[in-house]
Amino acid sequence: MSARQDAIGQATASQRIKDLAFRLALLACLALAIGLLVVLLVDVALDGVGALDWDFINNFTSITADKAGIQAGLWGTIWLMGVCAFFIVPVGVATAIYLEEYGDPTKWWNRLIELNIQNLAAVPSIVYGILGLAFLVRGPLSLGNVVLAGGLTLALLVLPMVIIAGREALRAVPSSIREGSMALGATQWQTIWRQVLPAAVPGIATGVILALSRAIGETAPLIVVGAVAVIAFNPEGLDSQFTAMPIQIFDWISRASNDVNNYRPLAAAGILLLMILLLAMNSVAIWLRNRYEQKW
Amino acid sequence: MEAASTAAAAGGRPEAPSLRAARRRYGEDLIKGLLVVAALISLLTTTGIVYALVKETIVFFGEVGVGEFLFGTKWTPLFGDPSFGVLPLIAGTFATTLIALVVAIPLGLGAAIYLSEYARPRVRKTIKPMLELLAGVPTIVFGYFALTFFTPEILRSFLHMDVAIFNALAAGIIIGFLIIPIVASISEDSMRSVPQALREGAFGLGASKFQVSLRVVFPAALSGIVASIVLAMSRAVGETMVVLIAGGQQPQWGADVGKSMETLTAFIGATAKGDAATGSTAYKTIFAVGTTLFVITLAMNLLSIRFVRKYRQVYE
């Protein structure tokens, strides 16, 4: 853009130096942020790559670090994600449809729902853990520290993400589609179900995957709802006790500093596996968005 | 939503026949009812959070004075002779949040200005996903990094600082990096929504790129920038895993960030990990501290939402 200044012919030398210094400072900010990410990834990879093998995936955790693996955590996480997806897809999409297609945004109750969702998206995750502890694990539902309670807690945590993504996807469908459908005599629901929703599916699916990839790494709420760290079985149902990958990793990190066994490579290997899963999920989300996104 | 006003208005001419459905469709009403129920779940979530927190907190305050809790400077709730002053936990939260902001504000804003004002579209397209990746890394990973790399390798070996292995400084700095994407993406969004005409006007008057960025675009985007900082602050206050892993669990009424400082979130995490029995003191303190945390973050979130609305209104 300095061409513009040359053309005007006004920029003095000191101004140009200032400009360059500013630009370099900005670049340094970006480089520092991304540099830390790179160092973090490399550090974790170096720590963990030695321990990440088939035994690690196939063994349960153990009091001897050499024999410990993440199988229970991996299956626990799969169960949790299943419960979570089963809940957030219908509820999230229905809420998004209500707010975008039915709700009158000038009415105070709809504005309240909207404000509420915006706030929920920023409530600390550990507070959702407290909610799960008070209502799901104990209190009214008293499910105990089981898969269903953990999965629903995570679902409530990421629900706002699904709703917000769903609304954006619905909003991107042009209103001419709706008007065309209604003009042909379709009812409002027929229009939504047969025209609007199919067009919005890629956007919604992307949102759901991103929400799940947030849920998969959440540790704090699971600690509060009482995921068990040391467990040597996979969940057998919704009422099974469970552990999860991040809980297992947290347990190993806590041990690393005070045990004769060295659990640090295990923690790093667990993190590596978690990051690989995350990367796979994000790639699918990006692929979905690029492959099926419609430009109107 | 326009479609919701039915096709009746579509003709526009007064003599047009009614295009409303000949009979009421109960199926449609039923579906709408189900959608409303789904939408109410999010309201119920908030109600549930508030109810759960308030109920146990009232029980807690039946045993501990409000004054002792809010102004006491000693937090030893699980000792034989317990003290319930929450200020040390607030101090820990405040310290880590402040450190995080010192890191995140300059770096996040610098990145935002670069992406919005300097970067070519292609550069922006490659760098933004990297920042998103930074935002997508689970916080437990940052905790691990702070404890096993940042404190020993950077703070101790490289900078020769005399810090404890669990310390508020490392936790705060790492949280700072974790919230950079929040500051950067919302600020960039708000800077890019500043109309091009403002920039062109300033260039026309002979301003340099540097002056345009800092004196025209930055002030014009200020409400969005403030929103991003407040939201990042709320995120830093609520961050749990980094402080739980790397910040230590020694409450400290002071500001020695080289040592362990327990935060509100770390206390909840550490206490809940011990599987507190319903009705026990430990159980009640989780809720009392949770309420404190929720009130602080709620205030920040509402403030940030207001600022975001403001910048959206001005230019869109």
Image: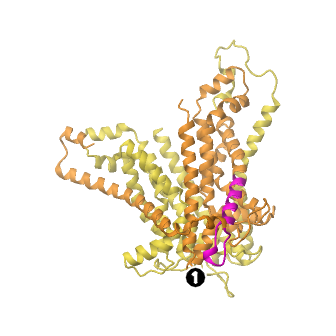
Q: Amino acid at mark 1?
A: Asn
Task: Spot the residue most to the top.
Answer: B15
| Residue at numbered disc 1 | A258
Coordinates of residue B212 in the picture (x, y in percent): 31, 46
Q: Which chain is orange?
A: A
Is A282 positioned to the left or the right of B113 in the image?
right
Q: Nearer the viewer, residue B300 or B116?
A: B116
Kind of element beneath mark 1: loop
Residue that sits furthest to the front in the current view: A54
Query: With B258 as the anchor, is A97 left or right in this view?
Result: right
State the yellow chain.
Answer: B
Rendered residue at 81%/27% (across/down): B24
The magenta stretch spans residue B12? no
Give the magenta range. Answer: A59-84
**Which chain is home to disc 1?**
A
Q: Is residue A209 above or below residue A275?
A: above
